[in-house]
Image (tube, grey):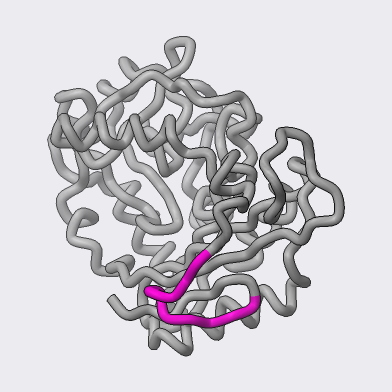
Amino acid sequence: MNRIVYVNGEYVPEAEAKVSVFDRGFLFADGVYEVTPVVNGKLVDYDPHMERLDRSLKELKMAWPCNIVAMTAMHNELIKRNNLTEGIIYMQVTRGVADRQFNFPKDIISSLVAFPQVMKLVDNPNARTGVKVVTTPDIRWLRRDIKSIMLLAPVLGKEEAYQKGAAEGWMVEDGFVTEGTSSNAYIVIGDKIITRPLSNRILAGCTRRALFRLAKEHGVGIEERLFTPEEAYAADEAFLSSASQFVMPITEIDGHRIGGGQPGPVVRKLREIFLEEAQS
């Protein structure tokens, strides 16, 4: 690819993009990130992503690398320079560049990098057939509400899922599903959606937030509570949500077919109303 990416105030070809080996994101995973969808050349759910970014930065006592006006302009400039119609903008903020030491360095400037990725978000073929999921132990740290770039545990879980022929891993802790390696997790029993309540054990997904609002507007019930893998195996439907997949049906969990192996009516409706808003 020949993308234009953003690195600390400059738009450069991806082959020329460089960060310091002393960047604390590289040395300590001392940073946070956001992924914002782009549909029809426009940012989707951008404000919630920036609100979550602000919260993550505050939780880590990390400074914004620029103000929100400049951040928004950067996102839109990347869309323009790359002629991005559909896909995502990935951006990450790290504490900055300093000699390697564990405590926070004084008087350094936060680093900001961002780049686009072309993806099929609206007409994703997996949405027509559904995807397979396997469960995997949740071995992450206990501040999953912070969107940290420290992602080795989810990487290991995702790779395990791929090796088993699945598209996603649902992480399990103390006998209950927490979330996917890169998504929020849901089951449907009857006409009610069940998903884990927000806490420091899961990430507050921006797509999740939009789905809660849309479900309420369209009379779809949501119950926030813990659920087990066994309950998921017997559910009428299951699905995941994320910025890069929106609403994705799940038709198999650990080899158990869900809903007869076909996307069900509740998840189809949710995806339809989400896409309708995203494309408006």
Residue farthest along the top direction in this orientation: 174
Q: Is residue 167 above or below residue 53?
A: above
Residue farthest along the front direction in this orientation: 99
Rendering quarter of residue 46: bottom right
In this rendering, position of residue 228 left or right of residue 32: left
Q: Is residue 237 above or below residue 93?
A: above
Q: Position of residue 246 (x, y in %)?
A: 39, 57
In this rendering, position of residue 1 left or right of residue 18: left
Residue drawn where x is 16% and y is 43% of the image: 262
Quick check: is 10 in the magenta stretch? yes
Q: Where is residue 205 in the image (x, y as percent from the top left)?
A: 54, 47
Q: Out of 280 and 199, give the one closest to the viewer.
A: 199
Rendering quarter of residue 160: top left
Residue drawn where x is 45% and y is 40% of the image: 184
Quick check: is 171 in the magenta stretch? no
User: Is residue 278 visible from the viewing direction of this image?
Assistant: no
Q: Out of 80 and 123, give the one closest to the viewer.
A: 80
Q: Which residues make up the magenta segment?
A: 9-18
Residue drawn where x is 43% and y is 23% of the image: 177
Q: Is residue 40 above or below residue 201?
A: below
